[in-house]
Amino acid sequence: MLLDLLDLPESEHDPGDVRDKADEILSRPEYHHGKSIMQRINEWIGDRLDDILHTLSFGGAMPQFVAWIILGVLLAGVAAFIVWAVRAGGWGRATGADREDAVVLSSSEDHRSPQEWLAEAVRHEEEGRWREGLLCRYRSLVAEMVRLEVIAELVGRTAGEYVRDVRNRRSDVAPTFSAATDLFEEVWYGGEESGPEERDRFAGLAESTLAAVTAGQGDRDRSTTAPREFQETPA
């Protein structure tokens, strides 16, 4: 035996008594440590999750995996709603008025006419650069609004400032101009996809905006306004 080899005396205490004594000692309050905050949080989350699963399974009437499926669908629905709400409200996306790099026209570009901007947009679109094409279409629209004296200045201003000008001077056309600005910002700053569909949407909004402006100004410069130039152009 091991005790014989080690030449140790045999124990005078019963092993069972020793274990009982050890359990008694370790059960004393001084040997009890409270649970950490993380342990309590994890236990609370686990308890709430069990409660939710128990409810979704109708008190255990359905298998637990069905409750997990229902929970997953609900969470996916909540996530989809949050994404929709963020996009609809524009939260987290800097507008033209909030971005330092959001100047739509620089000082070197102030002499281009609306027609020149539109021609450049068509060139970009024919080469598949839809994002750049939409930027030029927006610049063409802004230049036309400046010519019609709806927007005060052209150079070095942001899209958000243009929207404020239109709201202050022609509130009747603000909805369509704001929609065109939102579409431009979603593509140019928000990274949304751009293509023929976005081009056509923007062209329709631009045409509606300019038609409403000219309708309120009689025949003044109607021949040079040419809102029809913002209609669809071949891809």
Image (cartoon, rainbow, N blue to C red):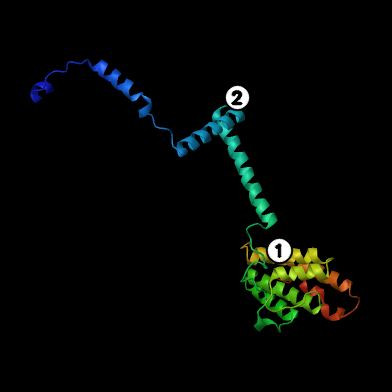
**Quadrant in which the C terminus appears:** bottom right
Residue 75 location, quadrant: top right
Q: Nearer the viewer, residue 28 or 82?
A: 28
Left or right for 63, reference 140: left
Mark 1 falls on what kind of element?
helix
Residue 167 in the image: x percent, y percent? Answer: 80, 67
The span from disc 1 to disc 2 (Cα, nearest Å) is: 48 Å
Mark 2 falls on what kind of element?
loop
Residue 127 location, quadrant: bottom right
Residue 138 location, quadrant: bottom right
User: Are discs 1 and 2 less than 8 Å apart at CB?
Assistant: no
Mark 1 Cα-neighbour bin, 10 Å: few <14, some 14–19, many ≥20: many
- Identify the residue shown where x is 80% and y is 66%: 174
Left or right for 171, reference 14: right
Looking at the image, is mark 1 or mark 2 earlier in the sequence? 2
Q: Which residue is mark 1?
A: 182
Residue 72 in the image: x percent, y percent? Answer: 58, 39
Left or right for 21, reference 49: left
- Marking on residue 114: none
User: How many numbered marks, from 0 up?
Assistant: 2
Q: Is residue 132 above or below residue 65?
A: below
Please state which amino acid type lies under the numbered disc 1.
Asp
Mark 2 Cα-neighbour bin, 10 Å: few <14, some 14–19, many ≥20: few
- Identify the residue shown where x is 67% and y is 72%: 135
The reply to whether residue 169 is visible in this rendering is yes
Q: Is residue 171 above or below residue 89?
A: below
Residue 25 in the image: x percent, y percent? Answer: 32, 23
**Quadrant in which the N terminus appears:** top left
The residue lying furthest to the right in this view is 218
Please state which amino acid type lies under the numbered disc 2.
Gly
Q: Which residue is mark 2?
A: 59
